[in-house]
Image (spheres, rainbow, N blue to C red):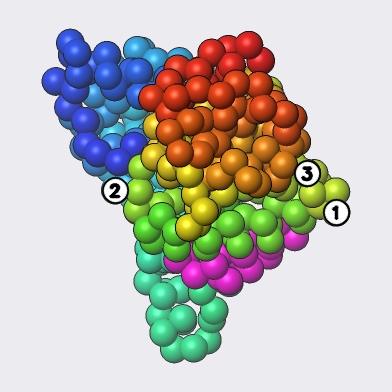
């Protein structure tokens, strides 16, 4: 199961140079370490295609080009080591233009993702929805099937489909319908899902409903938030589903399962600022290639006992911090030394 995210900003050649370029590459490598398998970029014009092509030669992360309206942008992206092209053939142009993209993609071995969104359906399907003759989920499926028919006409089979709506119910229904009719690989997620909390909730509901039925091959948790949080949310959803013994098709996580973070929400008993500690350590922990559980607890009364299954934990009381393993306190240090002591114990695992 592959987690995707999408770059949030427009890039220029200056972003690839000097210290800015190093920071950009480091961030992409960090996303990969956290569990991101594909990184998608919007490519609205030729200049963006040139920048993305240059970036593809600087990183090991597979990069996907998201293209609308101008088939020539897709053709140019295919001159570079781009891992995947995302298009909607309905807005790329006439069949000859679509054929040109498919022909070049076939010659380079690059797969194409057909992307269908609730907000960009063909006019005739949109009209049927407005007249009450068609539901949005069914319209998404019809649009995807039209595009798949075009691909079949030209003999192109390295294809996957995404059908996304801001409605959780429509997203679930559309993907269930197409999964019953076709074995085409599906990229799943809820589009325009909202800010962090709302977006995580909506995506979790949709992804769980589909993945437990064996529907979905790649995922993205779309958020009005950072790429890192999109990847973390996707990773946590997959972790939970991987442990679901009732799933029709168990989710398989490639490589290390990584660090599982458990923490208390904090209350009036707290003697340790779990919120700030987690904020400092979260991304570092998610980048570690260790199959361990880390507990960050708020008080010494319940911390070690409630998190006794953790491989490593930390809590505190007053000006002291306690580090514990499997419920047993192994170190008591000053709060000022908490971060350095925690890192030392992490390195021992």
Residues tagged 3 and 2 counted as in contact (Cβ below 8 A)? no
**Residue bearing the label numbered 3:** 243
Residues 305 and 307: in front is 305
- The disc at residue 246 is 1
Q: CA distance from mark 1 to mark 3?
A: 9 Å
In the depicted structure, whether residue 27 falls above or below residue 8? above
Determine crowd level at label 3: few under 14, some 14-19, many 20+ residues with C-alpha closer than 10 A.
Answer: few
- In front of the other: label 3 or label 2? 3
Give the residue displayed 38% in from the left and 25% down from the top: 336
Could you say where residue 64 lies in the image, as x and y percent from the top left? 42, 32
Q: Quadrant of the N terminus?
A: top right
Q: Is there any visible trace of residue 330 in the rendered image? A: yes
Give the residue displayed 57% in from the left and 29% down from the top: 322
Count of numbered circles on the image: 3
Q: Which residues are magenta?
A: 161-185
| SS at badge 3 | loop
């Amino acid at each position: 199961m592959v987690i995707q995210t999408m770059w949030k900003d427009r890039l220029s050649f200056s972003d690839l140079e000097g210290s800015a370029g190093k920071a950009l590459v480091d961030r992409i490598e960090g996303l990969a370490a956290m569990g991101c398998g594909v990184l998608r970029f919007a490519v609205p014009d030729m200049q963006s295609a040139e920048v993305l092509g240059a970036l593809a030669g600087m990183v090991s992360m597979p990069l996907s080009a998201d293209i609308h309206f101008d088939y020539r942008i897709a053709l140019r992206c295919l001159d570079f080591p781009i891992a995947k092209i995302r298009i909607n053939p309905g807005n790329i142009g006439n069949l000859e233009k679509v054929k040109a993209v498919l022909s070049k993609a076939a010659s380079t071995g690059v797969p194409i993702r057909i992307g269908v969104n609730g907000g960009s359906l063909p006019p005739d399907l949109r009209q049927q929805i407005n007249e009450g003759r068609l539901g949005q989920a069914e319209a998404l499926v019809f649009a995807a099937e039209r595009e798949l028919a075009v691909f079949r006409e030209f003999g192109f089979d390295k294809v996957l489909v995404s059908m996304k709506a801001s409605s959780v119910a429509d997203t679930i229904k559309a993907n269930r319908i197409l999964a019953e009719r076709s074995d085409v690989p599906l990229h799943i997620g809820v589009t325009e899902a909202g800010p962090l909390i709302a977006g995580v909730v909506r995506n979790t509901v949709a992804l769980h409903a589909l993945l437990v039925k064996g529907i979905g091959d790649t995922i993205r948790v779309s958020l009005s938030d950072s790429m890192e949080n999109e990847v973390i949310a996707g990773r946590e959803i997959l972790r939970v589903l991987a442990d679901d013994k009732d799933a029709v098709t168990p989710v398989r996580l490639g490589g290390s399962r990584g660090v599982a973070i458990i923490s208390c929400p904090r209350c009036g008993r707290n003697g340790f600022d779990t919120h700030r500690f987690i904020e400092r350590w979260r991304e570092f922990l998610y980048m570690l290639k260790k199959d361990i559980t880390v507990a960050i607890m708020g008080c010494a009364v319940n911390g070690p006992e409630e998190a006794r299954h953790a491989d490593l934990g930390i809590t505190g009381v007053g000006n002291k911090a306690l580090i514990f393993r499997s419920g047993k306190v192994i170190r008591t240090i000053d709060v000022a030394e908490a971060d350095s002591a925690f890192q030392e114990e992490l390195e021992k695992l």
